[in-house]
């Protein structure tokens, strides 16, 4: 198929297939030349660095955490590959072993630009002193936006919300790294809250869950488990009954048999799969149960104590059945993770510890859960929006669905794995999915008129959307029909805003962001956005561009609306430019250029930048990208323009393409924000 736009034909935008390492290939330095997992490696016979649990030489894995030693104690459920060597730091010329962000987004048909402003909480025990630094390395390696304490994206607290952290532990630190990296991979725009429990007791971990919810998280991942006991129903009431919050829990790594808190009726129990590329299929991927008849792999089975929730109708268990849904967990098809605390950097991890934060992040991509609802019920109303896993087993149970994959529901994989986000939204069985595009964090000044258009789409045609908003600064309101937020803010302060859109079937989507209102902008600066026509919805107005660059063709998607800027994509020697002059007031103290960039390329190299996009302020190049930044969706980029405060400067995007193999640079929703 060819993609057409006015006056030219561009080569099809596609992501090049990436070969999986052959069985027996030696992985050196924890890095490979393409984003594929190390399916098999040369075993070293030693545990991965950071592991404190048991080693399985047959499977070349080690448990990161020791088994629970007392009743009511929990263990993390992360497994480390022991046959993958490691390296420290960022390696621009190579890709870490194990699946990365674009792999997960491709396998589960997930958007990379949704989730802005949503907070995913990670609950683990003990402290990881290197958590934020390791998170930065992972995100830098894959070109994800920075997520730091200073920019408000990352926050770490103890189980009571303070900053006096518990004792550090290398095993739980590895678990924490896995969890943070999986949120980053699946929802790059999400904020992350790490809540560290004092110990691995259910009481401390449960207290941490409550703290995460009290701090505003609508999505809470728990990658730990232990034996069931008669106190579980009490723990349910104390720690996991949080209507309107999606709480995910790993189902276990010991095969057939239920664990707590996965068996809680208030949580989404997340099983595990083996995920492999399958070039001959429409999806491009295939999955089976992670496990074997010997009894390892994802946990599943009947709870001995928790009542069956109303939405669960299988007949093999009179009480709660584990699991509900699943995602990749097999260490043999594991995930790239960066962990440097008493560890050696790049690792390949697995276990249902990986699948829990993956699913929590998919809930975040899907939008804010409905107030008063139990999000664990959502997938049961949207079973057609999941990938049904029909092969594999995690133990012996007489071929029952409780340990053997079947068409429809089964224990090890639940209803299946994500196929987009529709299964994780509220709203009956209509299957409609409403997606609200976050406008990003806003900063305005008291007394300055505001006009902000909220954009939303519906998976069904012909639907009329009704808009609403909560948390708007005083003086602002949203038009229910158009989604336009307008008015004049009257009071300084910071507000957490959630905008929602609902269609006639009551399918709802939401997006959250922060709106800051200041009394003045840096000694007289009026905080605001300076670019004309920043989303290109008025065509070329305000911009100077090469012929055909600003277009509304359907050959490639816009980030929002209909128009975007499409530079290059010819597969021949070519240069496109896009520019606008802007004056940054001298009274301002902060200025940043932001834009959403989607790079698609037919280039297969992972080392050479053949086709390039540069961003210049005047004659100075302030950012550059290339075919090496290709992905599966838009990623927001930020460039500081602070050196140009008090100046008029031309901001210019220049795309240059060599003689063969197209690379397209798609740009949308630009902004120059000053304050």
Image (cartoon, rainbow, N blue to C red):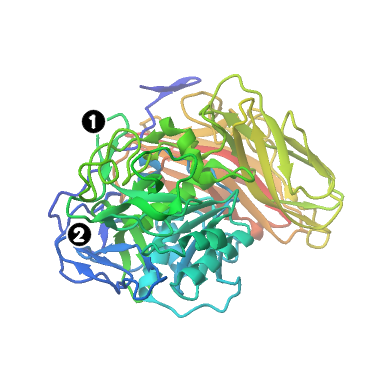
Q: Is residue 360 left or right of residue 427?
A: left
- In the rendered image, the quadrant that contains the C terminus is bottom right
Residue marked by disc 1: 280
Q: Position of residue 337 (x, y in %)?
A: 35, 60
Q: Position of residue 656 (x, y in %)?
A: 43, 39
Residue 455 in sight here: yes
Q: Quadrant of residue 70?
A: bottom left
**Residue occupying the far left of the picture:** 24
| Alpha carbon distance from label 2 to label 1 | 26 Å
- Helix, strand or loop at disc 2? loop
Give the residue displayed 48% in from the left and 51% down from the top: 265
Q: Position of residue 458 (x, y in %)?
A: 57, 28
Give the residue displayed 47% in from the left and 29% down from the top: 556
Is 658 rendered above or below residue 591?
A: above
Q: Is residue 608 left or right of residue 521?
A: left
668 or 314: which is nearer to us?
314
Say if mark 2 contacts mark 1, CB within 8 Å: no
283 or 2: which is nearer to us?
283
Q: Residues within 10 Å of mark 2 (few under 14, many from 20)?
A: many
Q: Is residue 536 left or right of residue 609?
A: right
Is 169 rendered above or below residue 304?
A: below
- Helix, strand or loop at disc 1? loop
Q: Nearer the viewer, mark 2 or mark 1?
A: 1
Residue marked by disc 2: 27
């Amino acid at each position: 198929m060819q993609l057409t736009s006015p006056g030219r034909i561009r080569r099809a935008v596609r992501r090049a297939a990436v070969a999986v390492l052959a069985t027996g290939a030696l992985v050196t330095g924890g890095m490979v030349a393409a984003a594929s997992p190390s399916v098999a490696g040369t075993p070293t016979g030693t545990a991965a660095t950071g592991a404190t649990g048991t080693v399985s030489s047959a499977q070349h894995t080690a448990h990161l955490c020791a088994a629970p030693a007392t009743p009511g104690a929990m263990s993390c459920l992360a497994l480390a590959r022991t046959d993958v060597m490691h390296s420290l730091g960022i390696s621009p010329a190579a890709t870490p072993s194990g699946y990365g962000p674009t792999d997960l987004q491709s396998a589960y048909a997930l958007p990379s630009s949704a989730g802005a402003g949503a907070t995913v909480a990670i609950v683990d025990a003990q402290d990881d002193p290197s958590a934020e630094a390791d998170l930065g390395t992972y995100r830098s390696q894959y070109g994800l936006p920075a997520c730091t304490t200073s920019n408000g994206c990352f926050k770490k607290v103890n189980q009571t919300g303070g900053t006096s952290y518990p004792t550090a532990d290398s095993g739980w630190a590895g678990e924490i790294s896995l969890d943070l990296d999986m949120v980053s991979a699946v929802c790059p725009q999400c904020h992350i809250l790490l809540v560290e429990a004092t110990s691995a007791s259910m009481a401390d971990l449960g207290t941490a869950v409550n703290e995460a919810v009290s701090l505003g998280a609508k999505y809470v991942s728990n990658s730990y488990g232990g034996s069931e006991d008669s106190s579980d129903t009490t723990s349910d009431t104390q720690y996991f009954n949080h209507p309107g919050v999606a709480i995910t829990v790993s189902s276990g790594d010991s095969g057939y048999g239920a664990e707590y808190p996965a068996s809680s009726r208030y949580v989404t129990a997340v099983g595990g799969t083996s995920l492999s590329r399958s070039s001959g299929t429409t999806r491009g991927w295939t999955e089976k149960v992670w496990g074997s008849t010997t009894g390892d792999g994802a946990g599943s089975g009947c709870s001995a104590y928790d009542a069956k929730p109303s939405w669960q109708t299988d007949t093999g268990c009179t009480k709660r059945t584990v699991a509900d849904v699943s995602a990749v967990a097999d260490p043999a098809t594991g995930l790239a993770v960066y962990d440097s605390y008493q560890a050696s950097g790049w690792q390949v991890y697995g276990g249902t510890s990986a699948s829990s934060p993956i699913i929590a992040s998919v809930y975040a991509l899907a939008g804010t859960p409905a107030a008063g609802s139990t999000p664990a019920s959502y997938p049961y109303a949207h079973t057609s929006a999941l990938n049904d896993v029909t092969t594999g087993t995690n133990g012996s149970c007489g071929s029952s669905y409780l340990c053997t994959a079947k068409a429809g529901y089964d224990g090890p994989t639940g209803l299946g794995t994500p196929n987009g986000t529709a299964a994780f939204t509220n709203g009956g069985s209509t299957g409609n999915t409403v997606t609200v595009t976050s406008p990003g964090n806003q900063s305005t000044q008291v007394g300055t008129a505001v006009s902000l258009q909220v954009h939303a789409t519906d998976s069904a045609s012909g639907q009329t959307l009704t808009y609403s908003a909560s948390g708007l600064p005083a003086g602002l309101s949203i038009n229910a029909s158009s989604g336009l937020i307008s008015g004049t803010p009257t009071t300084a302060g910071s507000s957490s805003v959630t905008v929602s859109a609902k269609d006639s079937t009551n399918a709802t989507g939401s997006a959250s962001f922060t709106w800051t209102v200041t009394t003045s902008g840096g000694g007289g600066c009026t905080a605001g956005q300076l670019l004309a026509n920043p989303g290109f919805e008025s065509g070329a107005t305000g911009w100077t561009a090469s012929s055909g660059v600003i277009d509304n063709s359907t050959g490639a998607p816009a980030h929002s609306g209909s128009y975007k800027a499409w530079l290059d994509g010819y597969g021949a020697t070519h240069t496109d430019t896009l520019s606008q002059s802007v004056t940054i007031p001298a009274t301002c103290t902060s200025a940043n250029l932001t834009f959403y960039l989607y790079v698609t390329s037919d280039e297969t190299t992972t080392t050479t930048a053949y086709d390039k996009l540069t961003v210049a302020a005047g004659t100075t190049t302030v950012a550059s990208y290339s075919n090496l930044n290709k992905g599966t969706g838009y990623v927001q980029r930020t460039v500081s323009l602070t050196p140009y405060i008090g100046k008029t400067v031309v901001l210019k995007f220049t795309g240059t393409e060599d003689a063969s193999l197209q690379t397209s640079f798609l740009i949308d929703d630009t902004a120059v924000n000053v304050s």
